[in-house]
């Protein structure tokens, strides 16, 4: 899936492994979203310096951090004081200028408000301390049925996904509910055409209770429906193809 991995950013709990960055820089334009930064911009700075992409960072708590007044925001960075939540939240806003500070919205609405609906996001970097599950799992599926122990209902058919090529995400498993949600998330990635090109435990910032994953999206068929035979027990999860056209994201 990936012929050339490169670590972008600092060593330890900050940088990320990127798949074939030379293919991204070969494009005329590239786009990167960074969800969660904690007033540290090493990853964004490395992306800007090494790849020259347009970068949008999202963090609703950034100016609440200690020593925020001493932080210099890079001029090239598009910073948005918004949080990420379930899909559909924020649909009442017509433009990005209408969004109040510290608003929480679905990623689908953020993409719409920034006029990136038809633009491929080359890299989506996510480090939001467990909030990745309520934000991303419903993004993949129409969900229905009774909630499980973790609060996530079983998924139904796929939604129309945003055009995200790579997803670099820290997956948290330091709570019982997170373990169940992580299993569901990993299955969602698999059945939506993503393959894992990198994974490693975070032994610096999370003492091994979080894992850094790199996912790459391949060409996928439309109309692939997940059938959860034994939901969420980690034993039997499968899928089937239904009628539909094929699509490619390239």
Image (cartoon, rainbow, N blue to C red):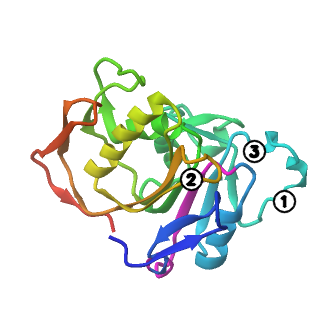
Q: Residue at x 30, y 44 (%)?
A: 187
The percent position of residue 84, horizontal first and vertical second, equals: 56, 39
Compare marks 2 and 1 and give the one earlier in the sequence: 1
Q: Locate the C terminus by quadrant.
A: bottom left
Is there CB contact under 8 Å for labels 3 and 2?
no
Q: CA distance from mark 2 to mark 1?
A: 27 Å
Q: CA distance from mark 3 to mark 1?
A: 12 Å
Residue 74 included in the magenta stretch of the image: no
Q: Residue at x 29, y 24 (%)?
A: 144
Q: Answer few, some or many: residues within 10 Å of disc 1's Cα (few below 14, many 20 plus, some between 14 and 19).
A: few
Compare marks 3 and 1 and give the one earlier in the sequence: 3
**Residue at the extreme left of the image, as rendered:** 243
Residue range highlighted in magenta: 23-37
Q: Secondary structure at mark 1?
A: loop
The residue labelled by disc 2 is 202
Q: Secondary structure at mark 3?
A: helix
**123 lies left or right of 189:** right
Quadrant in the rendering for residue 209: top right
Q: Residue at x 79, y 59 (%)?
A: 73
**143 lies left or right of 22:** left
The residue labelled by disc 1 is 72
The residue labelled by disc 3 is 62
**Which is more toward the observer, 147 or 83?**
147
The percent position of residue 34, horizontal first and vertical second, equals: 59, 55
**Which is more toward the observer, 24 or 20?**
20
């Amino acid at each position: 899936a990936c012929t050339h991995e490169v670590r972008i950013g600092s060593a330890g709990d900050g940088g990320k492994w990127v798949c074939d960055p030379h293919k991204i820089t070969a494009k005329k334009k590239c786009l990167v979203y960074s969800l969660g930064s904690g007033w540290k911009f090493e990853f964004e700075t490395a992306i800007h310096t090494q790849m020259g992409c347009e970068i949008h960072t999202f963090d609703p708590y950034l100016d609440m951090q200690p020593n925020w007044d001493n932080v210099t925001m890079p001029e090239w960075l598009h910073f948005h004081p918004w949080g990420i939540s379930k899909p559909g939240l924020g649909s009442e806003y017509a433009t990005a200028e209408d969004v109040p500070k510290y608003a929480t919205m679905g990623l689908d609405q953020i993409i719409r408000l920034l006029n990136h609906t038809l633009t491929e996001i080359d890299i989506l970097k996510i480090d939001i301390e467990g909030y990745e599950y309520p934000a991303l799992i419903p993004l993949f599926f129409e969900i229905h049925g009774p909630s499980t122990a973790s609060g996530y209902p079983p998924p139904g058919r796929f939604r129309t996904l945003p055009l995200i090529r790579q997803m670099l995400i820290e997956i948290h498993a330091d709570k019982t509910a997170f373990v169940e949600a992580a299993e569901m998330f990993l299955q969602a990635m698999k059945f939506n055409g993503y393959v894992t090109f990198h994974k490693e435990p975070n032994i610096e910032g999370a003492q091994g209770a979080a894992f850094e994953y790199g996912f790459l999206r391949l060409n996928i068929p439309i109309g692939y429906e997940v059938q959860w035979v034994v939901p969420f027990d980690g034993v039997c999860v499968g899928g089937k193809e239904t009628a539909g056209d094929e699509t490619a994201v390239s």
